[in-house]
Structure formats: C-alpha cells, structure tokens
C-alpha cells in the first residue's frame, strides 16, 4: 500500500529499520487484513491524509506477514500504532484512535 504522494508505505522486517532511520517522523501502524478495527483505522487515516503534517509518514506493518516485528515491539492487540521520531519510539496507541490525536502528536515533533 502506497498513497499517491508516497506518504503511506508498507514496511517489512527487511526495510523497517532503514526507513525509520531515514525519516524524521513516522507513525507505524501494526495491523492485519482480517482485523475490522484495523480496516476502520486505515479508512480514517486515508480520509484525512491531506491533513497529515508535512514531512511525516505513516507506515503499515502486517502482523501476519511480519510477526517478528510485532514481537519485537510487543504488539498484543491491533491496531497498535507507534510514533517514531528520528528512529526512536516516543509514543504508542492501542485500538482505533482519532486521527486528530495522531496528527497532533506527529505535529508536535
């Protein structure tokens, strides 16, 4: 999944660390295709993608395809999102979260 402007990207174990190290603000969404709340969160993000802070990215990690990454971040419920700033995790959310809250936190960095 990549948006027209490339600001939502799909990450795997192979490109995860490199992508986080190259980009200042990244919201990582751990999700699964069978997860209805995950699908709702994705729709909410897509509907407001144009409001996303400049220079920020949203990255999606499919927990079924990359369970090692899910284990690495101790993901126990999905959707679970982590905000990374300069490659360091600074905040986490579990469950469907309002986009305004996510984008406000992203903007503060």
Image (spheres, helix red, strand yellow):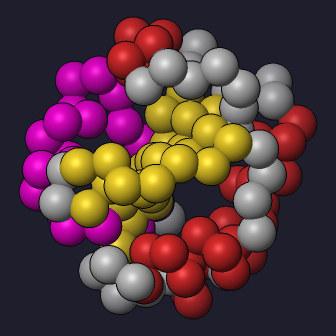
What's the magenta region?
4-25
Query: Residue 99's spot in the image, x, y percent?
Result: 69, 72
- Residue 67 in the magenta stretch? The answer is no
Please tell me which residue is depicted at 56% across the width and 35% down the height of the picture: 30
**Residue 57 occupies quadrant:** bottom left
Please tell me which residue is depicted at 42% across the width and 42% down the height of the picture: 10
**Residue 42 occupies quadrant:** bottom right
> Up-down: is 6 above or below 62?
below
- Taking depth in this image into account, of 90 and 98 the one nearest to the observer is 90
> Up-down: is 11 above or below 33?
below
- Judged left or right of residue 109, residue 98 is right
Query: Residue 87's spot in the image, x, y percent?
Result: 19, 50
Q: Is residue 41 visible?
A: yes
Q: Is residue 9 visible?
A: no
- Judged left or right of residue 75, residue 96 is right
Please tell me which residue is depicted at 36% across the width and 55% down the height of the picture: 90
Q: Which quarter of the figure is the C terminus placed in?
A: bottom left
The count of marks equals 0
> Up-down: is 66 above or below 31?
above
Please tell me which residue is depicted at 26% across the width and 62% down the height of the picture: 85
* Residue reaching furthest to the right: 36
Query: Residue 49's spot in the image, x, y percent?
Result: 59, 78
- Judged left or right of residue 13, residue 31 is right
- Residue 24 in the magenta stretch? The answer is yes
Query: Residue 68's spot in the image, x, y percent?
Result: 39, 10
């Amino acid at each position: 999944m990549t948006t027209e402007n490339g600001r939502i990207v799909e990450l795997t174990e192979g490109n995860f660390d490199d992508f986080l190290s190259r980009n200042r603000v990244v919201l990582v969404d751990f999700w699964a295709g069978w997860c209805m709340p995950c699908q709702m969160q994705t729709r909410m993000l897509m509907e407001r993608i144009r409001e996303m802070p400049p220079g920020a990215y949203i990255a999606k990690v499919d927990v079924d395809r990359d369970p090692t990454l899910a284990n690495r971040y101790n993901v126990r419920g999905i959707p679970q999102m982590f905000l990374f700033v300069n490659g360091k995790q600074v905040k986490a959310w579990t469950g469907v979260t309002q986009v305004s809250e996510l984008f406000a936190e992203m903007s503060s960095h």
